[in-house]
Amino acid sequence: MSQLKRGAFLSYLNILLVNVVGLFLTPFIVRSLGNSEYGLYSLIGSLIAYLSLMDLGLNNTIVRFVSKFQAEKDKEGESVFLGTIMSIYFFISLVLILIGMVFYFRLEHIFKNSLLPSQIKEAKLMFLILLFDIGIALPSGSFLAICTAYGKFVFPKVITIGRYVLRTITVFTILSLGGRGIALVMTDTIFNILVVSVTFYYCIKKLGVRFSFKERNKEIIKNIFSYSVWIFLLAIIQNFQWNTGQIILGMHVKTSVIAIFSVGLMLGGYFGAFAGVINTLLLPKAAQMLSGKANADELTATMIKVGRANSFISFLILSNFILFGKEFIKLWLGDAYALSWNIACVIMIATFVPLTQSFGNSILEIKNKIKPRAIGMLICMLTAIICSYFLAGSFGMYGILFPIATAMIINTIINNVLFVNYFDFKISKFYKETFLFQGIFTILFLLAANFIKRHIAIYSWVQFITWCAVFSGIYVLLFFFIVLKNDERRLILKKT
């Protein structure tokens, strides 16, 4: 099996592992820490996540440029490039510390209306540890990016999976012994130190990577930032999308409400987890098609093929969550978190279409048309954040949720306009073949299933798993025979 196929398999294994373990570990963490402590842990994690964006999108840049140097067999140019990147990372670390310390001394003022003095003290300690943790994590990401650029897809995934498994075991042990949120933060820091050490050794000893700090090529620096700045901007927007709400809520409500909101966002994030892997795998396909001068019909046909595959998984997950999500959350975390279902449903619906159009984003990236997409998304998200700030005081979680969800939907419209402008995307054909029949089928199924579900009582995990399996099985069978095309059915039934 090739590195690419094994890397893809491990990517999906990692997603499955993170989702499954997260579903079991999260309630244990919540119960061990308590709602307030867990809310504080989520709040500080969201705040520090903004500082983690200081990598400026350089990891994506490393993959793109090192791949180019590898293809050209330019080892000297590669070493100068990587030396320049590491110098930039050193500068970023200094700036990061300065910005972090400004936040550190302002935490009392930022959260004076929502956190108790004892919570402020704990939050500041968590913040300092996480600030140090980011300084370690930045170079770790660059070494993993180098491995990917060298075509070594397996090693980064093995490291990621291994780290997650060991961290899970450690977190479970620490909390079982009475550890608190600070212990979890310190655990992440220790594991990041280990990952940096292992990946650095692999790059130097196994791949023969070298870093040259003797030269400073202004043209390289210009090329780095002309590409990475837009990747960085997209990362900022995505972080705003998932983390700003928790920080704004922290200014208005108790940490227990933040915990409910955080769980809803986490479940919504699980729904979209597959998009990242699929998009990564599609980048080479997009590059090949564009280099082969594929026309608009061919690009649209590929988007439809990928979109239909994504929509099947997405419709299955969404329909199950709509039917059984409330019961799942109550069994999982208790009745106190029932409102997380509302948050997750809105996020899932808002991200549904983008999940099916990942191939289009790959085309924009290959064509280096990220700038207009990033600017449009930035304007929408900043507007949503401003609205959220003024609405959160009156409407709580929903004052955060709906502006952000609306911005996400508008971003989808902007993306579609860009698809049409930059590669003549056949938008009506895509929506008709990807969503029309599938959507009608799913709505009718949900109506019928919900009628039946009214007469079903679910009070245990056995009942929950049984009825989920029954409804999922019926949905899959009906979808297979009614919705899928003949060639799609043949592809699924194909043994090799």
Image: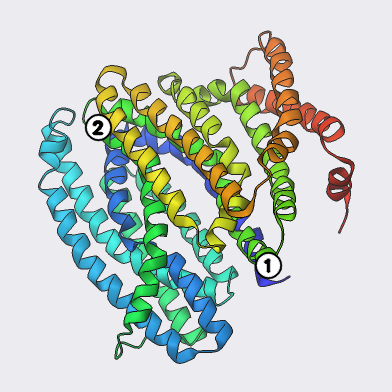
**Residue drawn at (50%, 22%), measured in percent from left and top?**
330
Quarter of the view holding residue 195: bottom left
**Helix, strand or loop at disc 2?**
helix
Q: Is residue 483 in sight in this rendering?
A: yes
Mark 2 residue crowding within 10 angstroms, few (<14) / some (14–19) / many (20+): many
Colouring: rainbow
- Residue 157 image label: none
Residue 142: x and y in percent read: 41, 70
| Amino acid at pointer 2 | Gly
Residue 1: x and y in percent read: 73, 70
**Residue drawn at (68%, 67%), measured in percent from left and top?**
288
**Helix, strand or loop at disc 1?**
helix
Give the labeled residue for mark 1: 288
| Amino acid at pointer 1 | Gln
Point out the tag, 1 or 2, that comes first from the N-terminus: 2
**Residue drawn at (53%, 79%), measured in percent from left and top?**
68
Give the labeled residue for mark 2: 250
Mark 1 residue crowding within 10 angstroms, few (<14) / some (14–19) / many (20+): few
